[in-house]
Image (spheres, helix red, strand yellow):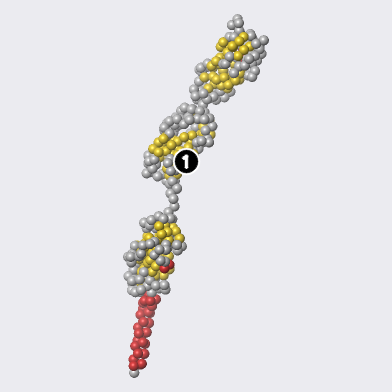
Amino acid sequence: MRNRNEATSVATLLATLLALGAGCHLDALLGPPGGGGGGRGGLASLEQLRSDTTTPIPSGGSTPEPSIVVRAVVRDTGHATLRLEVEIQPVGIDFLGQPTATSNPTSSGSPAYVLVSGLQNNTGYHWQARAEGATAWQRFGGTAANVADFSVVLPVAATRLVFTRQPTTTTAGATMAPAVEVTLVDAQGSTITIFAGNVHLDIAPNANPSGGVLAGTVDVNAVAGVARFSNLSITKAGSGYRLQATADGLTAVTSGSFGINAGIAHHPKFLVQPSNTTPNTPIKPAVQVAVMDVYDNVATSFTGTVYMSIANDGSVTKNATLEPSGTQRAAAAGIATFEDLKINLVGIGYTLVASATAVHAETSAPFDVTP
């Protein structure tokens, strides 16, 4: 009789379980494989993802963002919708059993997503999750408290200086216009407006074709990330100049190439001085004169006539003359060559004077005319 009653009780219990399983899904009662389903709730397909909700973060891997997304399929036989709860802690800190972040309501059997943000750089984290209302947490990967499920490693900000307004070709001694501007930008090229540090400009070491010196205010504090240099100038003419911008803690940056043109004609300069000669014989090598600007650059735009005459007559009678046909030459790119200068009388200590319209005159070094 006793055995019959026991068999009846077992049969009744099985029937009850089968009935409940049919109406409530038996797996929810038992919980998902691997634990974490005590009570009514269960999880499946637990994943850690980048913030795009697509890119997986491998267990023990790293992410370059201060946030992660936890994904899991949530199941609950007692509710049509429920939430995914996540607790995340830095490595070395035990779980408290309290959710750090919770998903939006999600249909049972569907994936739920939880965004966990505000994570710290260069920090490892471990985490656990559960379905809302479940009494047991499921650890991701089952890792210990001192093992990271993932780490946050933010990329170093690629801040750099850039010339946002380049130097332009200008005339010797003239202010560069428009003003040169140097800006601090981030990796995406956006201006870092909080930057107010000092930016220093100079001629780049390997891009100074004429030994020029950068004049003006060359140290400027940035305003809203931009350093503006409004009174720069260079007096030495040349092509292929570049400027270099530097600031503490940042890599130097070099500008585009530019030139400095000579100014207007100001004075002659003997490139080839007259040398000793004999009467009525062309001076060799040929005397050569350049017309210079005020900064002693060859005024290459000058194409006028340069005149040559005797400044100091070294003859005894003081009535020596130059052969007229050799005393005037048109300049080419600011340079005049006198290949047929002849003096008719013997003398010691002759000098010549070069002149041109609207420029100062220049006297040569002394020379002799001997028999």
Quadrant containing the N terminus is bottom left
Q: Position of residue 55 (x, y in %)?
A: 45, 60
Q: Is residue 2 left or right of residue 309?
A: left
For the point 54% across and 21% down, which residue is it? 291
Quadrant containing the C terminus is top right
| Helix, strand or loop at mark 1 | loop
**Residue at label 1?**
252
For the point 46% across and 38% down, which residue is it? 245
**Residue 106 in view, yes or no:** no
Q: Quadrant of residue 164?
A: top left
Q: Residue furthest top?
A: 317
Q: Tell me which amino acid carries mark 1.
A: Ala
Q: Is residue 258 left or right of residue 21?
A: right
Q: Position of residue 264 (x, y in %)?
A: 50, 23
For the point 40% across and 38% down, which residue is it? 198
Q: Position of residue 32 (x, y in %)?
A: 40, 73
Q: How many numbered marks, from 0 up?
A: 1
Q: Quadrant of residue 247?
A: top left
Q: Is residue 50 above or below residue 342?
A: below
| The one of 207 and 265 positioned closer to us in this rendering | 207
**Residue 244 in view, yes or no:** yes
For the point 44% across and 59% down, which residue is it? 62
Q: Is residue 115 above or below residue 16?
A: above
Q: Residue furthest bottom?
A: 1
Q: Residues within 10 Å of mark 1 (few under 14, many from 20)?
A: some
Q: Position of residue 60 (x, y in %)?
A: 45, 62
